[in-house]
Image (cartoon, grey):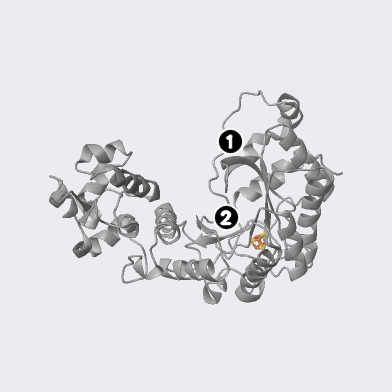
Amino acid sequence: MSRAPEEKLNILGPGAQLDLCQQSDRPMPDGDGSAPGLARAEQRYHHGDVRRHITTAQHPGRGPIPVLRVLQTNACAKDCFYCPFRAGRSFRREAYRPEELARLTDELHRAGLIQGLFLSSGVVGHQDHSMGQIVATAEILRRRLGYTGFLHLKLMPGASEAAVEAAVRLADRISVNLEAPNAARLARLTGTKDINQDLVAPLRRAARVIRRLGRRVSQVTQFVVGAAGESDAEILDTTDRLYREVGLSRSYFSAFRPVPDTPLDGQPAEDPRRQHRLYQADFLMRQYGFSRADIPLDGGGNLSRGVDPKLAYARRHRDSFPLEVNRADREQLLRVPGLGPRAVEAILRARRAGPVRDAAQLRGLGIDAKRALPWLLLDGRAAPRQLTLAGLTEDESPDA
Ligand code: SF4
């Protein structure tokens, strides 16, 4: 017997939470129930407790927005060793028809519960068949129901150019999860995916289609960290290459956690600090002007777990510091621990009005002076605590 859409959400919603291809994945806080139609929608979806399937995603222009994350189906013909949906694993399979998922999304959107949809899927039959289901849902939403919300569509492994184009025409964001940084590592995670044909090729196709159509569609990917014995260097090398070659907007990193009754069941979970450090290194490459070669790694090609990579960089380049806050250029200031892009813009603006002379001025600009001062000169003078703080070893230091 076919299940109601809200009941299917309890099966197909949690699956999509495993995919981090969103800026943040906090559950939505309870709302005040004031949005039009909200009470009606909550009453209807009370059975499915719909809020559990709504998380926040980063919208390029609007910041964090509430997004429904759901799978078109949790059935899959692939065998990814870490994945709860892999072929042959015994659990309850379910699928949405495009019409019912589109209507569910539209209703939640009209009720003010969501502003976006993140739609992923297992692969059933030919990859373009699964893509077709995703695209059909998106088409009904956009063209028939007039949905104007954010739309993030997953591209299936090996998706053809035509399928990719159909998705790009409808989506605001698309993604293909690489999961591993290269062919050798991916071979330790699956016997049914080829990294170049199935994963990198759809990203390249999407980059071509986005350029040809002139659409503002972002591309993202995700890595499972720590499942294939890979180093941080391997992940960062691949990420860096994709930023340059296919215009990837960003990468997501998901620390491996073993799933019962999968081939990696007995493997230990990855330290979540590793995921955190990869995000920090990735930010340095995307927003702080660091090259891949600037990222400080140990002899095994890994980031320090105990120290922020930007602070580790500064410690390895002590001869470049302290920087005179009134003369250093934007790129130099972005290398100072504690100074992000907004802080640097604030300093540059303040300098136009006159020299920055003391820590109070920095604090007045909203800057965490305690972290930045050890690496700066203020109008030729070092802050009193400068030498003490800068002299700490990596393991003694606070995060920067
Ligand atoms: S393709 Fe792999 S990761 Fe994706 S749902 Fe299927 S088994 Fe899971």
* Helix, strand or loop for disc 1: loop
* Residue 97 visible, this orientation: no
Relative to residue 352, is residue 239 depicted above or below? below
The first of marks 1 and 2 along the sequence is 1
Closer mark to the observer between disc 1 and disc 2: 1
Image quadrant occupied by the N terminus: top right
Tell me where residue 136 appears, x and y as whole percent. Answer: 81, 54
Check contact, mark 1 vs mark 2: CB within 8 A.
Answer: no
Relative side of 146 to 244, left or right: right
Residue 295 shows which numbered tag? none
Please name the residue shown 67% across and 64% down the image.
210
Q: Which mark is residue 28?
A: 1
Front in this rendered view, residue 255 or 309: 309
The spot of residue 35 in percent (x, y) is: 68, 26
- Hey, what amino acid is under mark 1? Met
- Judge by depth and name the residue closer to the eye, 131 or 327: 327
Write down the residue under mark 2: 259
Calculate the distance from the C-alpha at mark 1 to the C-alpha at mark 2.
25 Å
